[in-house]
Image (cartoon, rainbow, N blue to C red):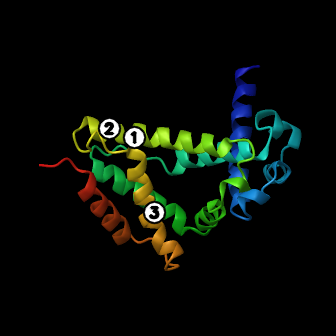
Amino acid sequence: MTQTDSSILAFDEQLVLDAAIEELTTTSAGMVTVAAVAKRAGVAVEDVRRTWPNQPELLTAALMHYGQRRLSIPDTGSLRGDLLGYARRFADEMNSQAGRRLLDALLVTPKDWDVTGWRTAFVAARNALTAAALQRSVDRGELRPDVDPVRVVDLLLAGLRVPLHLYDRPISDADCVFAVDTLLNGVRPKD
């Protein structure tokens, strides 16, 4: 395979992963099919299945790709800055129509799309990225080493989803600041 062939393949994969996210914004996770994603991406189903043999693997890859591109935890030099930057990215994404639909589509039980255990793989990969990002704060002495970084992010995101799901309103910057500051009061080292 030449360098050009390799870059075309990477572009096609990104195109398919983006199409999978777009498909998720139009239906529930359990209803997304490899064929529908291939059609949306304008590629052959067989080409998609060579990389992702089934729907759970395709959705897992698409969600990881989406998260890494749009919802990664920034490195601002401080725990508060990192979490606030992450909260604001999450708010920007979830306040959009597509982001809201994506979030709604993901509010499913594991049986809806975990026929081969790939939901577990998605959660494990997401948690590994979260832990690595927050390890910087442990290294700086801003986060106690005994605090589970995954739970920190889970609590932050749970608090940010309340305006969307309970009150049916966008996440405001004040929501982001309040959620981060309230959370930090519980995880900072004791003086």
Q: Position of residue 155 (x, y in %)?
A: 41, 58
Point out the image quarter for the N terminus.
Answer: top right
Q: What SS does tag 1 mark?
A: helix
For the residue marked with disc 2, what is the amino acid? Answer: Arg
Q: What SS does tag 3 mark?
A: helix
Can you tell which mark lies on residue 133? 1
Which badge, 3 or 2, comes first in the chain's sequence?
2
Viewer-nearest of labels 3 and 2? 3
Q: Position of residue 52 (x, y in %)?
A: 76, 38
For marks 3 and 2, give the CA distance.
Answer: 22 Å
Q: Residue at x 52, y 68 (%)?
A: 95
Give the farthest residue toward the left. Answer: 191
As displayed, is residue 139 above or below residue 60?
A: above
**45 left or right of 95 in image:** right
For marks 3 and 1, give the CA distance.
Answer: 19 Å
* Label 1 close to label 2 by CB (< 8 Å): yes
For the residue marked with disc 3, what is the amino acid? Answer: Ala
- Residue marked by disc 2: 136
Q: Position of residue 12 (x, y in %)?
A: 74, 39
For the residue marked with disc 1, what is the amino acid? Answer: Ala
- Residue marked by disc 3: 158
**141 left or right of 32 in image:** left
Q: What SS does tag 2 mark?
A: helix
Q: Residue at x 28, y 43 (%)?
A: 77
As displayed, is residue 168 above or below residue 126?
A: below
